Image (cartoon, rainbow, N blue to C red):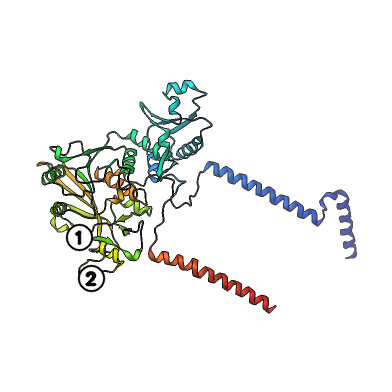
Amino acid sequence: MPKLIEKIKSTGSKIRELAPGFIVSQKSRYGMHNWLVVIMAICFIILVYVLASRHHYRIDFTENKEYSLSPQTIEVLQSQEEELELIAFFNDMDGAKSMVAELLEEFSYYTDKLKYRFVDADLMRSEAIKYGVKDSRYGTVVIQSGDKRTDVLRRDIISTRYSGRQPSQEFSGEQAIISAIAKMRKEQTTKLYFLVGHGEKVIGGRALDGLSTLMESLERESYQVEEINLLSREQVPEDCGVLVVPGPQKNIGSDEWQKMEKYLAGGGAMLYLLENQVPAGQKRFFKQLGLEIMNGIVVEPGAGYSVARDFRVILPEFAYHQITQKLMDTRQAVLLPQAVPLKYDNDQDIYYGGTLLQSSSKSWAELDLPLKRILGDNTFDEKRESIGGHQVAVALWRKKPRGHSHEEFIESRIVVVGDSDLASNYLLEIAGNSDFILNSLAWLAGEEEGITVRPRDIRKHPVFMTGGQSKFIAYFVYLFFPLLILVAGGVVWWKRKSL
């Protein structure tokens, strides 16, 4: 045993003589370990960077998905079959160039049919002359596909909006460019006729209750829009894709009703937006179609939704339909102030009917809203008023054989909404109002592929809370949170005192 120990010591001394660098101090070993960790971390970061550059994925935590492409944009890009070339005429001093570049780069992740390039018109005058881009048109994006071409101007990419007296500029590049691409693919443009002559909302009106914002949205969707007064027409024009009646305040004449009935019987489509005071003639017309326009205004005072002090508003629930399906999938909401309750009778077998929007079980049809608003009375009168689950938007459709043929059919479609204010300038772009109106028009025109959720404007959106939610936040901020701080301070004071 002593000889073995002596041999081990002798061997160890020889090793130290031959390889002194292998015998290191404990401090050196820790240093080597740290360097090894650093090198592994750098390798890991490089690996993540390489994978991220090849596989694009990001998460948008904003409530309105402001930094994500909309479902409509992705659908248009992924369904693109022909080659697209986008030439963006921007110089380096233009602040919009970086935003457009980032947008087009993101477009390219969803299709390999899209190629784009930027041209500085000041440095490459020949390119500008070739595409007819003059000094006044800098900021233009030229889109070409085969022998088709369309130009998206700077005023469409950077839109100017007015809030009171102060104009503000907003980047609307996604809406403008995708709408232009969709327009190029559209073989035939649908024409919308807006009825006038009965106190309807004005299609070009820029007042709060006007429809100029809707007009801009319709142009982006490639619709042609024209006003029509049926008193001066023999019939609804044959090229009418959808007849829109935006909140008539006066009775429509019997001769006009006959023209509208004839148009619908021939396979027409109509979007009818009601005012809260519905004339008797309108009620009689829809009664013949199996739809009863009931008395009163749908209210839900307990919910506490409000965008102004002089009326109640509701956030109705969606019912399943082609128009509402994608709105339901993306958890959108529709805002309706002073909606008229509707009731469709399926037993009449005139039109098939389906609910689009329905108020909650806590709502009721208020008959004395002006008086109760003055008195501050929000109670339900069970003897006179009907409670719960009122239809506030319905879709009606009918198919009948064309002549004696059993293979060809004439289909008529109608959408009736119990409130016209959701299409007005001050409410259209709140929540899902715009998508609901545009999806309704797409369904009415038989363009179901146009039913989607569209690109969002980057702007501030109000938050609507129920009365219970408002109370919870108030109690938390003014009672619970201060009390929590007081208790925490008391605990700290008690512990220090006991030391």
86 on left or right of 321:
right
Q: Nearer the viewer, residue 310 or 188?
A: 310
Q: Is residue 8 above or below residue 450?
A: below
Crowding around mark 1 (Cα neighbors within 10 Å: few <14, some 14 to 19, many 20+) is: some
Q: Mark 1 points at which residue?
A: 295
| x and y, in percent, of residue 340 in the image | 24, 57
Q: Name the residue under label 2.
A: 382
Give the quarter of the image for residue 220: top left
Give the quarter of the image for residue 183: top left
Q: Which residue lies furthest to the left in this view?
A: 404
Q: Which amino acid does label 2 sit on?
A: Glu
Using the numbered discs, state the Cα–Cα distance from disc 1 to disc 2 in whole angstroms. 15 Å
**Tag 1 secondary structure:** loop
| x and y, in percent, of residue 450 in the image | 31, 43
Q: Which of 292 and 384 is in front in this view?
A: 384
Q: Which of 280 and 51 is in front in this view?
A: 280
433 on left or right of 26:
left
| x and y, in percent, of residue 92 in the image | 53, 31
Question: Is residue 361 visible from the viewing direction of this image?
Answer: no
Which residue shows up at 51% across the image and 43% down it? Answer: 55
| x and y, in percent, of residue 236 in the image | 16, 39
Which residue shows up at 43% across the image and 47% down it? Answer: 459
Question: Is residue 321 visible from the viewing direction of this image?
Answer: yes
Q: What residue type is labelled 1?
A: Asn
Which residue shows up at 24% across the image and 69% down it? Answer: 381
**Tag 2 secondary structure:** loop
Which residue shows up at 73% across the image and 53% down it? Answer: 33
